[in-house]
Image: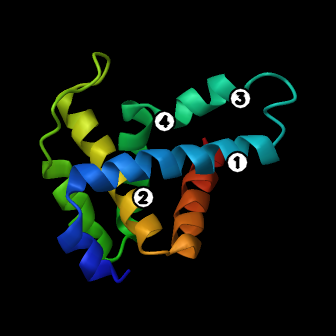
Amino acid sequence: MRKQEIISRYGSLALAYMGDAVFELEVRLHLLENGALKNGAAHIGAKGFVSAHAQSGFLEILEPHLESDELAVVRRGRNAKPHSRPRGADACEYSRATAFEALWGYLFLAGDYDRLSGLFEIIISKLMQR
């Protein structure tokens, strides 16, 4: 499906719904490949990636690297009005996390897997610097 078709066919919350699953799968694959399952740290490691707080921070890392169509998806995702939000996240963080997930869903549905991998690598390399 072409990127413009995705934008017109799916709302931001639908993209975020898909992106949540895609990102979690990417995180689980990363943890598996890096031995987290051997020492039982997979669940703890995954929680550090999939929280609203973490995803809001990841979006901040990625924004300078995003293309114009990706920034448009992020804007739409940030402005989406979810029906609820987790107790532990403030509204701003949750909006940014939704935008992050919408970006992931958009790129996945567009079949742009190389771009997803590249963005994930940017996140991992930034985390390794800390």
Residue under the image location 57 percent in, 68 percent down: 118
Quarter holding the C terminus is top right
Q: What type is the residue that disc 4 sits on?
A: Val
Give the vertical position of 85 relative to 82 (above or below).
Answer: above
Residue under the image location 50 percent in, 75 percent down: 112
What residue does disc 2 label? Answer: 104
The disc label shown at residue 50, or none: 4
Measure the C-alpha gap from mark 1 to mark 3. Answer: 10 Å
**Label 3 Cα neighbours within 10 Å, binned few <14 / some 14-19 / many ≥20:** some
Measure the C-alpha gap from mark 1 to mark 4. Answer: 13 Å
Tell which circle, 3 or 2, labels the residue nearer the N-terminal end.
Answer: 3
The disc label shown at residue 42, or none: 3
Say whether marks 3 and 2 touch (CB < 8 Å): no
Image position of 129 (left or right of 57) = right
Residue 108 horizontal/vertical position (percent): 46, 65
Give the vertical position of 27 relative to 91 (above or below).
Answer: below
Q: Confirm whether residue 68 shows in the render.
A: no
Say whether marks 2 and 4 touch (CB < 8 Å): no
The disc label shown at residue 113, or none: none
Display coloring: rainbow
What residue does disc 1 label? Answer: 30
Q: Secondary structure at mark 1?
A: helix
Q: What type is the residue that disc 2 sits on?
A: Trp
Q: What type is the residue that disc 1 sits on?
A: His
Quarter holding the N terminus is bottom left
